[in-house]
Amino acid sequence: MKAFLYHVLNNLIIDQYRKHKTISLDILLEKGFEPSVTESEHIFNILDGKAAILLIQHLPETYKKIIRMRYIQDLILQEISTLTGQSKNAVAVQIHRGLEKLKILYTHK
């Protein structure tokens, strides 16, 4: 019985330490934390986004159309599947494959 209790208590202690504690942004702001975003990071993000948009033109037509709908026009899978006449699963697969090809193009630029 002692071994069982020791084992259970040990696992409870380990579980307590492993729990992921979320901290609300509101609580952090109340304590005085201010997230810093430097202007150079913002500019680099904009330039990277524009470069990725330009690389979409180099994708095959099927991926180009789907990627534009998803990331430029901000359509959800259901809307894209309705517009293209494909299933949501087929659209999701095309988005995934298109992003993989876009990543390859982006790393080789």
Image (cartoon, rainbow, N blue to C red):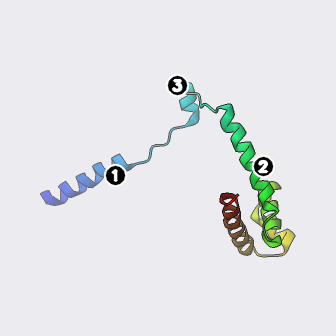
Q: Residue at x 52, y 25 (%)?
A: 31
* Observer able to see residue 106: yes
Q: Nearer the viewer, residue 32 or 105?
A: 105
Could you give the CA–CA distance between mark 3 and mark 2, rounded to whole angstroms?
36 Å
Q: Which residue is mark 3?
A: 31
The residue tagged 1 is 15
Residue occupied by mark 2: 50
Q: Residues within 10 Å of mark 2 (few under 14, many from 20)?
A: few
The amino acid pointed to by label 3 is Lys
Which label sits in the foreground, 2 or 1? 2
| Residue density around tag 1, few if under 14, some if 14–19, many if 20 or more, within 10 Å | few
Q: Amino acid at mark 2?
A: Lys
Q: Under tag 2, what secondary structure?
A: helix
Contact, mark 3 vs mark 1 (Cβ under 8 Å): no
Q: Secondary structure at mark 3?
A: loop
> What distance separates the C-alpha of mark 2 from that of mark 1?
45 Å
- Quadrant containing the C terminus is bottom right
